[in-house]
Image (cartoon, rainbow, N blue to C red):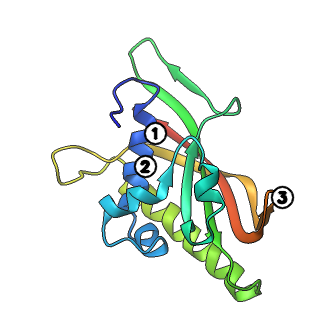
Amino acid sequence: MTFTGPLARPFEGLSLLLAASSSFQDAVRASDATEALQKIHYPYAIDEIIGTPDARPFAIITDDDSCSWNVDKNGIQRGSLLLTFEFLVESETVDNFVAFLNTVGAILEEMRALANTPTGGGGFYWNLRGYEKFTTPAICQREDFPNIIFYGATFVVFWES
């Protein structure tokens, strides 16, 4: 998959930034950023993935009408995307919920720290300008897959090129 246009490149930028987070790599049991990219889906996770309990944890990057995208007269692009985390629940306890919150918080903070810094390959990580909660972190269950219970949370991430 090649991200070439101005509407596609933000998906690539966010996925590369997310995959570079060591906390995300740990959460998805990836040995490196390249392997972590396999646990990032866009614009949604297909039912074959959603309906497979061991497919989680993963992240989904998507866009909807609540997100923005614009270009100013100088060609600077700005916008937002939605970033969802889904982590399988082994048992519903306060400790597991707090662990989910801590992990997601660490991922977001690592992404913020890496934003617009050198990648080591001659480029720079995506310019994440900030993030805010879109949906409250909570225990989730889909009607069409009742045997799979997971923690989920969605954030709006803001970017600028």
Report the quarter where the N terminus lies: top left
Q: Residue at x 44, y 36 (%)?
A: 10
In the drawing, what numbered circle is on residue 143?
A: 3
Please name which of the two marks, 2 or 3, marks the residue nearer to the observer: 3
Q: Around disc 2, counting alpha carbons within 10 Å, would you say few (fewer than 14), some (14 to 19), or many (20 or more)? A: many
Residue located beneath label 2 in the image: 15
Cβ–Cβ under 8 Å for marks 1 and 2: yes
In this rendered view, identify the residue nearer to me: 119 or 36: 36
Mark 3 or mark 2, which is nearer the start of the sequence?
Answer: 2
Q: Position of residue 61 (x, y in %)?
A: 55, 46
Q: In terms of image quadrants, where is residue 85?
A: bottom right
Three-letter code for the amino acid on which mark 3 is drawn: Glu
Image position, residue 88 (x, y; %): 64, 73
Q: Distance between the Cα atoms at labels 2 and 3? A: 28 Å
Could you tell me residue 129's position as x and y percent?
49, 44
Mark 1 — residue? 11
Please give the count of numbered marks on the rendered protein. Answer: 3
Q: Looking at the picture, which amino acid does disc 2 mark? A: Ser
